Image (spheres, rainbow, N blue to C red):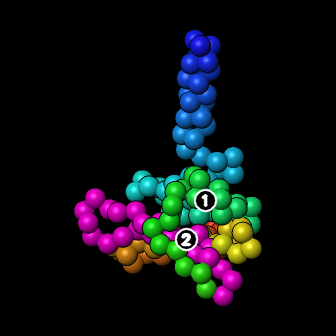
Amino acid sequence: MKKFVLFLALLFIGVGAASASDKSPNGVYRPTLGTHATSYLKKFPLNKVAVDEIVQYVGTPDKSLSVAGSDYLTYNIEPKSGSGVIEYTYIVKDGVVVNVTYLNSGNFFGVTQRESAIKLQTP
């Protein structure tokens, strides 16, 4: 009986440690207020991340929408001051993320992963 209880305890610890990981092997994590949006978008591995990985590491979306064969998973990040909302939207097509957008309604700054990569590549 003691061995069984010990096995269960170790199993729960192992499962808890596995589910507590902050970052996926592809580098996917939930952005926060401290996340630098341009850097996050630049490093995001487009066309490699499945929708299941987004839900597992970023969480359940605050909003979701399906339009013309694409799914839009939107996550809100509430600023402490309460002025506006920061949103990251993952655009999924054929089960993989094809683009990520960032919108800060507080200062009306928005950028997509593709735009961010182009800006960083131009001299």
Residue shown at 59% from the left, 69% from the top = 90
30 vs 66, left or right, is left
Q: Amino acid at mark 1?
A: Ile
What is the three-letter code of the residue carrying label 2? Leu
Residue 6, horizontal then vertical, whole percent: 58, 17
Identified at 70% across, 60% down, the residue is 49
- Which quarter of the rendering shows the N terminus? top right
In the rendered structure, which segment of residues is drawn in magenta? 68-91
User: At numbered mark 1, what does the secondary structure look like: helix, strand or loop?
Assistant: helix
Q: Residue furthest bottom?
A: 68
**Location of residue 80 with respect to 62 vertically, above or below:** above
Quarter the C terminus occupies: bottom right
Asked if the residue under mark 1 is in contact with the one under mark 2, i.e. CB atoms within 8 Å, the reply is yes
Instruction: Sort mark 2 into few (<14), some (14-19) or many (20+) by Cα contacts within 10 Å.
Output: many
Identify the residue at image location x=59%, y=81%: 66
Label 2 residue SS: strand
Q: Residues within 10 Å of mark 1 (few under 14, many from 20)?
A: many
Viewer-closest of 15 and 115: 15
Query: On the rendered structure, is 106 left or right of 60?
Result: left
- Left or right: 31 as drawn, with respect to 82: right
Which tag, 2 or 1, sits closer to the chain's start? 1
Q: Disc 1 marks which residue? A: 54
- Residue 56 within the segment the image draws in magenta: no
Q: Which mark is residue 113?
A: none
Residue 73 image label = 2
The image quadrant of residue 51 is bottom right
